Amino acid sequence: MLKNFSTPRGTNDILPDEAVSWQKLESRARRLLELYGYQEIRTPIFEETALFVRSLGQTTDVVQKQMLNLAAEKQDGFSLRPEGTAGVVRSYIEHSIDKKQGLAKFYYIGPMFRGERPQKGRLRQFHHIGVEAIGVSHPFLDAEIIALSVHLLTDFGLSGFKLKINSLGSSKDKEALSAILRKQLKAKLSQLCDDCQGRFERNVFRILDCKKENCKAVVAKLDRTDAHLSPESKAYFSQVQEALNSLNISFEISPFLARGLDYYTHTVFEISHEGLGSQDALGAGGRYDNLVKDLGGPEAGAMGFAMGVERILLIQPAEGKPDNLKTHVFIVTMGEKAYQQGFLLLNKLRQEDVSSEMSYTPGSIKSQMRLADKSQAPFVLILGEDELRENSAALKDMRSGAQEKIPFSQIIGVIKNKI
Ligand code: HAM
C-alpha cells in the first residue's frame, strides 16, 4: 500500500476558496498600514537561532520549547522564525536604517513557526500581520500603534474584542517588578507547576504567562501593584492612557500582563476575544526600547505588535467573507474548428482583462452549458458551425436568457461594455 501524505501536524493547506478571504484580509491590512505610514519589509523565514535566543530571551517558552531548528543547517544554528520582531530589528541594524530616517515604520505579513502542541487557534505554522516602529519613544506613538491594531480589527469586521494594557517600566523597573513578584510568590512556590518552580529562579515573569490552572489561580491572587514603576515610567504610562482616551479607544489595565517574550519594556498590550476559546489572543505587542541596542545597534526606542491571521479568520463574521472572483464569460464550442476559434478568443478576452473559461474537453453542448452554469459566469459565448460561417458568435446573457449574435470583430468591445 502506498503511503498517503498529509499536512504536517499544526499546519494547514489554504485551499482556493479560503485563499480569497486571506487575500481580502491582506489587501485591507496593506491599505490601512500604508495609510498609517508603514512600509512593507520582507525578512527571511529562517534566521540564526542565536538572534531569537538573544531577542526573545533564553528562558521563554518560545525559545525553550517551540523553536523549530533546521536539521540540515544544525551546525550553523538556524531556526524557522517564531516571530517577526527579531528579524526586523536585525535588518534595521544590518542596513543602518537609523542613519537614513529618524523613525522607521515597517509592516510584514507572513508565516511564523512554533513547535507547539496544536489545538484550536494554536498552530505550528501560523501567520502574522505585524508592525514595528523603530527610532522613537513617545506615548503618542504607543497610543497610535494600539489604536492601529484596533482599527485593523474593526476594519476586518470584528467586534467584541477586549484590549488590555500594562506598563512593565524600564529595565530597572522590571528588576523591581521581578523582586516584588518573587517576594509574593515565594510562599506559594509549592502550588506552582514544575516549570514555574524553575521559572521562579530563572525568569519570574514567565510564571505570569503560564496557562496551567493552578498557576493561573496563584497569579490571580497576587497583589496588583505599580510600585515598580519610577515616576518617569508612571508619567509615560499615564500619557499613553490619556492619548488612548483622546482617541476613544476603550481599554482595561491589567497589572500583571507581562507577555511571553523578554524584550518588552514600558507599554505592553494584548487584544483578546472570547469567541476564540482558550487561545483567546487575537494580537499583542508592546514597546521594546532596549532590543536594538542589545543586538548591537544604536540606542533606538521601538514598539510593535503582531496579530494572528488564523485567529482573525476564525471569528471574522461570515458577511466579511468575500466571494471568489467570478468568471465573466464561459465559451461553449461545437466542433473542432469552433474549439480552435474559441481557444483564441479565450486568450484574447483574458488579455483584455475579462476573466474567461472554457471546457478543454468539450463534450455535448448540454454538458458544456452545465459547466457554464456551474462557473456562474453571467455571459456565455457560443461558437457553432453556423456562427463560424457568419464570422460571429452568439452571446447569451445567463441572467435574462436573452441571446444575440455578435460579429467577431465586435465581441471584445460588446462584452467589455456589459461587464
Ligand atoms: P505573540 O503574542 O507571541 O507576539 O504573537 C502575536 C499573535 O500571534 C498572538 O496574539 C496570536 O494571535 C498569534 N499566535 C501566536 N502563536 C500562535 C500559534 N501557535 N498559532 C496561531 N496563532 C498564534 C509576537 O510574536 C511579537 N513579535 C509581537 C510584537 C511585535 N511585539 C512587538 N512587535
Image (tube, grey):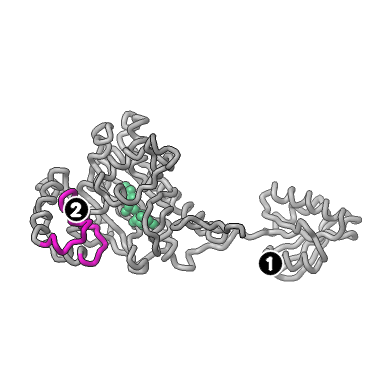
Image quarter in which the N terminus is found: bottom right
Q: Which comes before the other along the chain, label 1 or label 2?
A: 2
Q: Residue at x 67, y 65 (%)?
A: 376
- Per the picture, the main secondary structure of the magenta-coloured stretch is helix
Image quarter in which the C terminus is found: bottom right
Q: Residue at x 51, y 59 (%)?
A: 21
Q: Please give left or right for residue 303 compared with residue 74 in the image.
A: left
| Marking on residue 401 | none
Magenta span of residues: 188-214
Q: How many marks?
A: 2
Is any atom of residue 412 visible in this view?
Answer: yes
> Circle 2: is it few (<14), some (14-19), or many (20+) Cα within 10 Å?
some
Where residue 397 appears, as percent x and y from the top left, is: 73, 66
Disc 1 is placed on an element classified as helix
Task: Residue 9: name its quadrant.
Answer: bottom left
Residue that protrudes farthest toward the bottom in the picture? 400
